[in-house]
Structures are given as C-alpha cells and as structure tokens.
Image (spheres, rainbow, N blue to C red):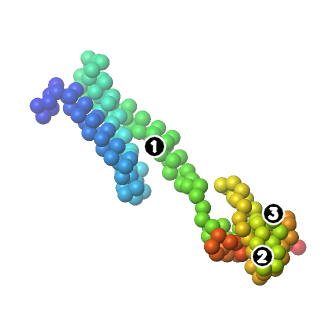
C-alpha cells in the first residue's frame, strides 16, 4: 500500500524518525513547554510524542513482520500505543512530577526552624547549632539574638540569618494545660 506516493512501511519509518528527533528536542526545551501539560494530560507534549512514537514503531514492525492488512496493523498499533502511553503517563510521568524537585536549600529557608546547640553560644560570641531537616543534619554558626549566652543541648529557634550566621533564641515550646 502506498500513501502520498511513499510505501506505508517507509512512511512509518519517517514518522518514527521525526517523532524521535522531536522527543529529543522536547527533552532539551521541556522547561519552556512545561505549562502546556497542565491544561490536560492529553495535551502534554511528552504524552503526544510518546503516542506518535509508539504508534509508528509498532506499525513499522507490524508491516515488516506480519502479512496483515495495513488498516489492521494501524488499528493494532494505535491500541498498543494507547496502552503503552497510559502506562508511561501513570507509572512514569505522574510520579516524576510529584517527586521532590530539589534537595537544595538556602539559609533563609531555614529560618523559623528549631535547632539544638552543639557548641555553647557565649555572650557576644559565636557557637554552633545543629538543624535536622529532610535533607540531613546541618551544622551552622550561631549567635544569641539578644547577645545572650545559650548552653549546650538547648533547643533554639532560628530567628534570622545574616552572612551565614544564624541569630537564635532559646526555644520555649507552647504547652497546652
């Protein structure tokens, strides 16, 4: 069978190559096209490109290896592509989107957390605190917020940060009676 003067098998191969190149380009510029997929999962470029790639690859292999009619191969390829696209979307793309974007943090993002003094903080001097986060334990330089001394082992609230030094105040948790 021919379509547009090209053998259908060759057309599937051309579509597969073009979809592969488009998928590679999408990986490189996906940050710019990120908002498109938010409207509907069916408009997501990754899903559309995967569908076209799966369809053309399955149809090409079907034309090479079977003696079925071109229409039955195309229908079979579309059904297989829908199933593979569904699996790709729900078992790869959705978990990737809900994964933590980064484990990076800034000192400013740590303000408001509670830490523990590991090197006593003297009056008008520096000590060290340990902050436990989901990223791990962080040891940071600290001074008393009102230049007060804070003993080893005390819990402190991180009030603000300036030039990598945390200003802390002894933490007094609110207790309901």
Instruction: Determine which residue is flagged by label 2.
Output: 125
Label 1–label 3 contact, CB within 8 A = no
Which residue occupies 32% across, 30% down? 57
Q: CA distance from mark 2 to mark 3?
A: 14 Å
Instruction: Determine which residue is flagged by label 1.
Output: 89
Disc 2 crowd rating (10 Å Cα; few below 14, some 14-19, many 20+) is few
Of label 2 and label 1, which has the lower sequence position? 1
Query: Up-down: is 66 above or below 104?
Result: above
Q: Judge depth for marks 2 and 1 and give the one in front.
A: 2
Q: Along the horizontal axis of the image, is 26 left or right of 149?
A: left
| Mark seen at residue 118 | 3
Quarter holding the N terminus? top left
Taking depth in this image into account, of 132 and 44 the one nearest to the observer is: 132
**Position of residue 130 measured from the top left corner of the image (x, y, whole percent):** 75, 62
Q: CA distance from mark 1 to mark 3?
A: 47 Å
Q: From this viewpoint, is residue 168 visible?
A: no
Determine whether the residue tagged by mark 2 lies in a helix, strand or loop: loop
Determine whether the residue tagged by mark 3 lies in a helix, strand or loop: strand
Determine whether the residue tagged by mark 1 lies in a helix, strand or loop: helix
Residue, far bottom: 146
């Amino acid at each position: 069978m021919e379509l547009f003067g090209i053998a259908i098998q060759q057309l599937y191969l051309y579509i597969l190559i073009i979809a592969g190149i488009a998928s590679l380009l999408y990986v490189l510029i996906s940050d710019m096209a990120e908002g498109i997929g938010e409207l509907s999962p069916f408009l997501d470029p990754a899903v559309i490109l995967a569908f076209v790639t799966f369809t053309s690859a399955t149809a090409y292999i079907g034309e090479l290896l079977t003696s079925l009619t071109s229409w039955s191969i195309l229908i079979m390829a579309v059904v297989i592509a829908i199933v593979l696209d569904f699996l790709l979307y729900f078992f790869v793309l959705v978990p990737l989107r809900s994964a933590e974007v980064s484990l990076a943090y800034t000192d400013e993002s740590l303000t408001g957390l509670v830490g523990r003094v590991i090197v006593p903080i003297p009056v008008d001097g520096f000590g060290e605190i340990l902050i436990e986060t989901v990223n791990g334990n962080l040891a940071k330089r600290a001074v008393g917020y009102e230049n007060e001394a804070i003993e080893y082992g005390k819990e402190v609230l991180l009030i603000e940060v300036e030039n990598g030094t945390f200003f802390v105040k002894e933490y007094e948790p609110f207790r309901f009676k």
